[in-house]
Image (cartoon, rainbow, N blue to C red):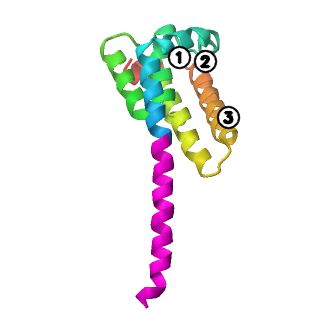
Amino acid sequence: MMDAWLPVLASMGTDLFRLLLKIFLIILPLFIVLEYVQRRGMLDWLGGKLGRFLGFLHFKKNSIFPLLAGLCFGISYGAGVLLDEARQGRLEGKQTFLVATYLGICHAVFEDTLLFVVIGASGLLLVIPRLVAASLVVYLLGFLPDRFYAKIGG
């Protein structure tokens, strides 16, 4: 009975190893590039280029770095940057809320997309709906009166 399962288990093990290798080959270079981008200040440059669009979404200049960090590096890193910026007093309650909301809907754009593309998903179908949904929600939330944000920690 067990002899019938050996080829199946061997095939599963081989496929799992190949998938893990693909994930490793995507994540490692991605983190190296992202670390380089961060150290060279390229996120600030990108924030400058996206400033007009991000301003349309009610983001102020000081909220661009935590937003881009979360989009590029993922929710954990982005949340860490966001909390640090808020604790240092560089972000007001409204900006903290808007960035957290955007990242809750759309984070780790590069990493997640590459991982799913490896297993056959369409990159555009993964990225565009997330970006559109997050942008729409944050745009609408930006119209809430400031007293709303004061109640949630502003």
> In the structure shown, which secondary structural element does the residue marked by tag 3 occupy?
helix
What residue type is disc 3 on? Ile
Q: Is residue 113 visible?
A: yes
* Numbered circle sitting on residue 145: 1
The residue stretch that appears in magenta: 1-25
Q: Main secondary structure of the magenta part?
A: helix
**Which residue is labeled 3 in the image?**
128
Q: Which of marks 1 and 3 is nearer the N terminus?
A: 3
Check the picture and name the quadrant holding the N terminus.
bottom left
Q: Which of 133 and 27 is in front in this view?
A: 27
Q: Where is residue 108 in the image (x, y as percent from the top left)?
A: 50, 34
Between the C-alphas of marks 3 and 2, the distance is 16 Å
Above/below status of 135 relative to 41: below
Amino acid, disc 1: Pro
Q: Which residue is the site of mark 2? A: 57
Instruction: Answer with the quarter of the image where residue 132 lies.
Output: top right
Query: Looking at the rendered structure, which numbered label has been put on residue 41?
Result: none
